[in-house]
Amino acid sequence: MTQKIVLASNNAGKLKEFGSLLATVGREVHAQGEFNVPEADEPFATFVENALTKARHAARLTGLPALADDSGVCVNALGGAPGVWSARYAGEPKSDAANNLKLVADLAAHADKSAYYYCVLVYVRHADDPQPVIADGAWHGEIIADARGEGGFGYDAHFWLPALNRTAAELTAAEKNQHSHRGQALRALVEKLR
């Protein structure tokens, strides 16, 4: 029997990515927009608190189990910034281009360009679930000044992967899912849900 769950996001890419893997453990994923759930506030300084807030919000408004993620890029020389503020690093309105320009500029004076993408996933069975299922993943690389690649989104064109000799934006969708922070977190979550 398949269980319907709500994804605390309207991102079509995430819906597809999460939907295909969660189908293997009997979960049918629907975007929160299908239920007219507005985006939750993300006021916290940690990924896990923001993801938990989003999951509880979606579960409360739909009465369904919910899954939420919070993720971003953390740059070591910048003390972990942009971190939880990755989507709005350059301010409002949120813009990948503006965020990338700011990140490259902020990092220009630093020799250490190491960075990592981090993702935390939170699954709640109901809004007041005392034992949310939490999984995370990290993907290490470095920030380069010149964008490379057409794929991906966010900081992918500036996220260099020395082991693969490419940026995240130069990977195929399948390669990205295999290596990425979100792919790692999702596989870990699926194992916990089994």
Image (tube, rainbow, N blue to C red):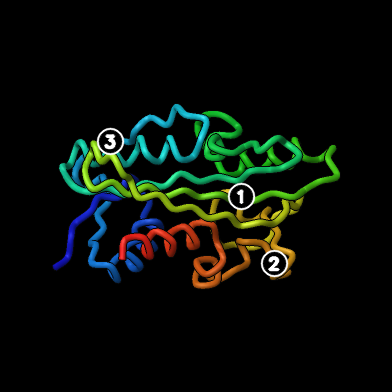
The kind of secondary structure element at disc 2 is strand
* Left or right: 21, with 74 as reference point: left
The kind of secondary structure element at disc 3 is helix
Q: Amino acid at mark 3?
A: His
Q: Nearer the viewer, mark 1 or mark 3?
A: 3
The kind of secondary structure element at disc 1 is loop
Q: In the picture shown, does residue 33 fall above or below 94?
A: below
**Front residue of this view, candidates 108 and 110:** 110
Numbered tag placed on residue 155 in the rendering? 1
Q: Which residue is mark 3?
A: 57
Q: Earlier in the sequence, mark 1 or mark 3?
A: 3
Q: Position of residue 191 (x, y in %)?
A: 38, 65
**Front residue of this view, candidates 176 and 21:** 21
Q: Residue at x 35, y 67 (%)?
A: 21
Q: Which residue is mark 2?
A: 166
Q: Position of residue 68 (x, y in %)?
A: 36, 46
Give the CA distance from mark 1 to mark 2.
13 Å
Give the CA distance from mark 2 to mark 3.
38 Å
Q: Amino acid at mark 1?
A: Tyr
Q: Position of residue 30 (x, y in %)?
A: 24, 54
Q: In the picture shown, does residue 184 fall above or below 68?
A: below
The count of marks equals 3
Q: Amino acid at mark 2?
A: Arg
Give the CA distance from mark 1 to mark 3.
27 Å
Q: Earlier in the sequence, mark 1 or mark 2?
A: 1
